[in-house]
Image: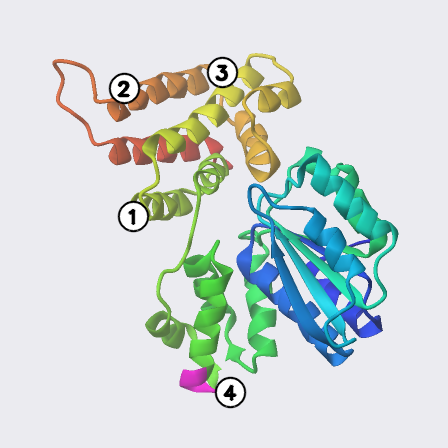
Amino acid sequence: MQLKAEQLHGQLRDGLTPVYFLTGDEPLQLREAVDAIRAAARAAGYGEREVLDVEPGFDWSRLSSAGANLSLFGDRRVLELRMPGGKPGQEGSKAIAAWCERPPEDTVLLVSAGRLEAAQRKAAWVKALERAGVMIQVWPIGAAELPRWLAARARSAGLNVSREAIALLAERSEGNLMAAVQELEKLYLLHGEDAVDLEKMTFAVADSARHDVFDLATAAFSGNRRRVIRITGHLREEGAEPVLVLWALAGGTRASAQIRSGVNAREALRNNRLFGGLAQAVEQAARRGDRHRWERLLVRCASVDRTIKGGTPGQPAAEPWSELLDLAVAIAGLGARP
C-alpha cells in the first residue's frame, strides 16, 4: 500500500509490515522515515541490522541468501537494501519480486531509493514491494506548504514562534529542510519555550535556502520578482551553470509563445519538457502576454545565449548572470497578475 510520509508513524503504531519501500530526493524526510522504522523495529524485538548497498556489479544473490539464512542469534532483524539509482536491472527485479512473494518471517526488508521517474514507478519490482508492505514517496515541500510545515515542526519541538518569524524562516530555508530544522533546534537552545518573534528570528537564522533552475523559472513565470532576484543570487553563489538557467527560462518562454500562437497548451508544455509546478506557472503566464511579447523575449533568450558563449565579436562582453537576472525579471513582469 502507498502512504504519505506523515502517515508513517500511525502505521508503525499499528504494527510492522514485512516490507518498507522509501523513495524520493528530500534527505531530511527520508532520513527521519528510515529512523522511525528502525526505532519501531527495535521496540518490536528486531535486534539485528544488516545493510546491502546496491552498486554497479552488485551480486543480487546476496539478497536471496540473506532471506534464506537465519539471523545470527535467532533474533529478528532489519535488512536494509539501499538503491540510490533506483534501477535494479532484470536480475535485481527478479530477486526483489521473489523476496516479496515469500518474505521471511524474522526479517523486515527496508528498501530505500532515490527519486523514481514515472516509468520506474510502474515497474514490476516497485509493484511487488508496494503489494508486500508499505511504499512511501517523499516529495519536496513547496514554498506554499513550507510555513505550515515549519509551524507544526516548531510546535512539536516546544517552540512558540510568531507567524512573521515562521515566514522569515521559510523564506531563508526554502529547499533545505535540514537547515530549517537545525535552525529550529538552535532557537530552542537559545530561547527554550519563550516566544520567538521576527526580531529574534532575524538575528538567529542564516540564509540557508537551496534552489535549482526550475525554482527560478517557476518564480519568473509566476510573476514573483522578489523570489527571482533572491533565487538568482543563490544559484550564482552555488556555482550553477548559466546555460542550465537559460535552458529553463527559454523553454518556458518558447512554450508561452507557442501557446499564444495557437498550439495546444499540453502539447507545447510537453514538447518543451515542462512539468509539474513550472508547467502550471508557464501555462498561466502565457495567457497574460501576447504572442509578440513572448517572441521578443525569445529573441532576448538568444542574446543571453550568445553572452554565455562568449559574446558577439566586436561588442563589449556582458556578464551572463546580470543578463539572466534581467531576462528572468522581464519574464516575471509578463507573468505577474494584473
Query: Which residue matches tag 2?
Result: 306
- C-alpha separation, residue under disc 3 versus residue under disc 2: 23 Å
Counting other residues with Cα less than 10 Å from the Cα at mark 2, is it few (<14), some (14-19), or many (20 or more)? some
Q: Earlier in the sequence, mark 3 or mark 1?
A: 1
Quarter-wise, where is residue 41 in the image? bottom right
Is residue 196 visible in the rendered image? The answer is no
Residue 147 image offset from top left, x and y in percent = 55, 62
Mark 4: secondary structure: loop
Residue 67, image quadrant: bottom right
Question: Mark 1 highlights which residue?
Answer: 237
In this rendering, does residue 298 appear at all? yes
What is the spatial separation of the Cα atoms under label 2 and label 4, in whole angstroms?
55 Å
Q: How many numbered marks does the figure carry?
A: 4
Range of the magenta residues?
A: 189-193
Of badges 4 and 3, nearer the viewer stands 4
* Three-letter amino acid code of the residue under disc 1: Glu
The residues bearing labels 1 and 2 have C-alpha atoms spaced at a distance of: 22 Å
SS at badge 1: helix
Alpha carbon of mark 3 to alpha carbon of mark 1: how far? 34 Å
Camera-nearest residue between 44 and 5: 44
Identify the residue at image location x=25%, y=35%.
Answer: 322
Residues under numbered marks 3 and 2 in contact, where contact means CB atoms less than 8 Å apart: no
Q: Is residue 16 above or below residue 133?
A: below
Q: Identify the residue position indicated by label 4 in the image.
A: 193
Lower sequence index among marks 1 and 2? 1
The residue labelled by disc 3 is 291
Dot 3 amino acid type: Arg
Which of pointers 4 and 3 lies earlier in the amino acid sequence?
4
